[in-house]
Amino acid sequence: MGSKDDILYYIDQVLGGNINAYTSIVDRHKNKAYNLAYRICCNHEEAEEIAQDAFLKAYRSLAAFKRQSSFSTWLYRIVYNTAVSHLRLKKTELLSLEDFPADATDFMGTGISEEEAEAEYRKSLINFAFLKISEEERSLITLHYYEDMSTAEISEVTGISKSNIKVKLFRARQKMLQIIENSEKKRIIRYEYSEGIQK
């Protein structure tokens, strides 16, 4: 994403009237901004729209950047707030447990082993559980586990206290675990039912 000094140089260029320098700032942060937006809204087109909107807001507010924190943290706050506002205006329908694939066999295909199919199933199960928690919980999980941010940095981005972030992260993990366990129970029931029919 470039060094802090690089970013400050480009910020000074933009504030000095060189609008083209903002392209360099966007290029260094667009992937991270998009990934955060996507993990909150879980929609590619909406994530692109949110990231673009956030960059526009950041451009308009660039003079307000205090430089006390890193630019990426400041930008994350804008992306986060933009994504949350977007979802409040448009509540998206999430998948129900009934929509989830019943077994790892659904991932079986040419050239894929049973172990690989099981691994794909596990990965999709975690992603499914991630979809079922709230947008706030998804953002906290993303910032902490995917972006490796400290609770202090996450607090700066979200405005949530450090102690509350720890509680919310714990609850989000517990929710995901419960969703995974419930889905696994459904998987076992389906398997036993199909075995009973075949006997």
Image (tube, grey):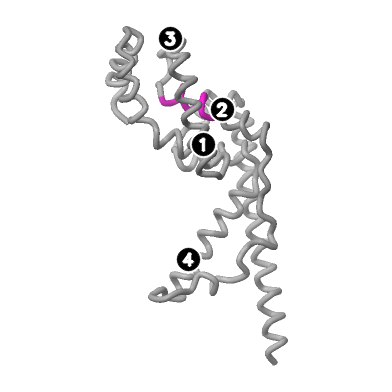
Q: Locate residue 189, reporting x and y percent.
A: 71, 74
Q: Is residue 175 left or right of residue 15?
A: right
Task: Classify mark 4: helix, strand or loop.
Answer: helix
Task: Classify mark 1: helix, strand or loop.
Answer: helix
Q: Is residue 68 left or right of residue 21?
A: right
Q: Assess whether residue 64 is covered by the magenta stretch.
A: no
Res 95 quadrant in image: bottom right
Task: Classify mark 2: helix, strand or loop.
Answer: helix
Instruction: Write down the residue under mark 2.
Output: 82
Check whether the beta carbons of the residues at disc 1 and disc 2 lie within 8 A of each other: yes
Instruction: Note whether residue 123 is visible.
Output: yes
Residue range of the region highlighted in magenta in the rendering: 72-82
Instruction: Write down the residue under mark 3.
Output: 63
- Labelled disc at residue 37: 1
Instruction: Write down the residue under mark 4.
Output: 119
Vertical comparison of 86 with 132: above or below: above
Indicate which label's residue lies in the foreground, 2 or 4: 2
